[in-house]
Image (tube, helix red, strand yellow):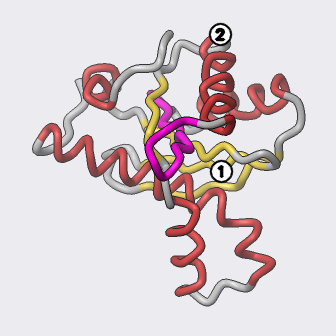
Amino acid sequence: MTAITIEQIGDRLAPGRTLCGLDLGTKTIGVAISDRSLSFANPRSVVRRRKFSADAEQLLSLFEKENVGAIAVGLPVNMDGSEGPRAQATRAFVRNMETKTDLPFVYWDERLSTVAAERALLEQDVSRKKRADRVDSAAAAFIQQGVLDRLHALSGSLSPK
């Protein structure tokens, strides 16, 4: 399966399936899972990165448990719109995941998602230690919510086929 565009998700997502959002960091992978109506992004526990095979196994297990039908991956684009080493690493991660699952992947420009997540956690008065543990999943939720909002805007009211 190759990466698809956001416009193709509605056609690929079966009714009752959820959307997963991923924020790939160097030490952790932030995870968020939508509700079944594809309206809200819900942060989950981060995946502590080890080796790709272990990370992939943990993610695939989560995808099955959460009835995931598609994955939105934050693409760390530079502020000028160019793609640097982090974006290339993200694309490589998705290419490797595509060999392990038939689920479709879509890239989402994640510029400033971590900054927004950090601000939201600060506004909630989350302690520094807890923020460090939650920021990647909060960023994944920001990424995923952006995708969900875009899907609703594209379709008027999202109704997967």
| Structural distance between the alpha carbons of marks 2 and 1 | 21 Å
Q: Secondary structure at mark 1?
A: strand
Q: Residues within 10 Å of mark 1 (few under 14, many from 20)?
A: many
Q: Residue at x 62, y 57 (%)?
A: 137
Report the magenta residues as a range.
68-83
Q: Residue furthest right?
A: 50
Q: Residue at x 65, y 10 (%)?
A: 99
Q: Is residue 96 above or below residue 134?
A: above
Q: Residue at x 51, y 19 (%)?
A: 103
Residue 46 on image: x %, y %: 72, 52
Q: Which residue is mark 2?
A: 99
Q: Is residue 6 above or below residue 28?
A: above
Q: Residue at x 53, y 87 (%)?
A: 123
State yes or no: residue 26 in magenta: no
Please state if 55 lies on the left or on the right of 75 as rendered: right
Residue 47 on image: x %, y %: 76, 46
Q: Is residue 127 above or below residue 132?
A: below
Q: Quadrant of the C terminus?
A: top left
Residue 95 on image: x %, y %: 62, 17
Q: Which residue is mark 1?
A: 30
Type of the residue with mark 1:
Gly
